[in-house]
Image (cartoon, helix red, strand yellow):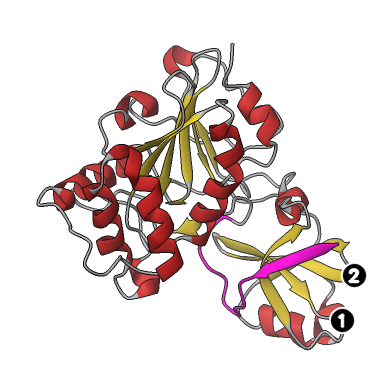
Amino acid sequence: MRSFIPMLMLGLPAVALGASTCPAAEPIRAAGGPPPSRPVPVMPEMGPTLPAADIAASPALARLASQGAQLYRLKSEHGLEAVFARSGTQFRVFYLTPDHLAEIGGVMWDATGHNITRDQVSSIPGAIPTVQWNPSGSGPGSRPGAASATTAPPAVDPVERVKAVAFGLEGQDTAPRVYMFIDPLCPFSTRAYAALKPAVASGRLQLAIVPVSINDHENKGASTPAAQQMLSAKPHDMAALWNQIDDLGHAVPGHATSDTAGASLMLNLSAAHSIGLRGTPTFVWKDRNGTPHVEAGLPDDLDAFLASLHA
């Protein structure tokens, strides 16, 4: 059985749709600095668009096309037709109801938590955002089990850069460390954390939880106080506080916020800018060969991802 986590919308948001992340409203900027320039997008290469007759016969398709979107057919899943909609540098997958009167823009998951939408677009260049830092002209490479589109490398080693951020810790100190940038109120961040908990408990990795606030534009400013509360906690208490915040949907009333929490949040946002973070969760780690990686969204093949951390 397959299930939806739909995001109902008629517009085409300016986010890549392969990875499951909460997108920032604008590029993350360094503290006190100007907003960074957006990277030049890698536009998907697609086949022919849907015939005009097919679009005219479907109210849902006609509605998307009326907004200037080019529409491409994808493989149907769970009895629902799927289309890839592109408008300039923006693109998204939509699923059509059987009567073609409505469309659902979002991500389809199966009963095991597998991201079906990601599979549908994995062969489309530019649809799944990943960055791998390759020092001194080393080969591009990629994480096992994941299709990726490589962008220009960051100016700094991302793992060395994020070592200086403020973070909480979950897991054994002897386990390989993976940094996870999260917005406390991002559902994709909490989903990723829940999926990685068994690996943390078994000693296969240590999570360094890096709070940032990128969802204030969607939750009326609730992410910033929630992130500052997390940054006021001791490192090994941060995850437990995050669970409370997630349950409430906002910062915990009456919970103290330290005088340094604001500065810590700015430090984390500056690091997020340095590595080109565009949404949460974003993972930063070194594989068993010492190669740094930055990737948006939870890796689909967790076993391959975890195996790549160990020598």
Disc 2 marks which amino acid? Gly
Question: How far from the left and from the top, in percent, is residue 242?
Answer: 39, 54
Res. 147 visible in picture: yes
| Magenta residues, start to end | 1-16
| Residue contact at pointers 2 and 1, CB within 8 angstroms | yes
Disc 1 marks which amino acid? Pro
In the orientation shown, which residue stands out farthest toward the right? 79
Q: Quadrant of residue 27?
A: bottom left
To which residue does mark 1 refer?
98
The Cα atoms of the two marked residues, 2 and 1, are separated by: 8 Å
Question: How far from the left and from the top, in percent, is residue 224?
Answer: 27, 61
Res. 159 mark: none
Badge 1 density bin: few <14, some 14–19, many ≥20, Cα 10 Å: few
- Vertical placement of 26 versus 119: above or below? below
To which residue does mark 2 refer?
79
Of residues 243 and 44, the one nearer the viewer is: 243
Residue drawn at point x = 71 percent, y = 52 percent:
115
Residue drawn at point x = 45 percent, y = 66 percent:
247
Question: How far from the left and from the top, in percent, is residue 240?
Answer: 39, 50
Q: Is residue 44 magenta?
A: no
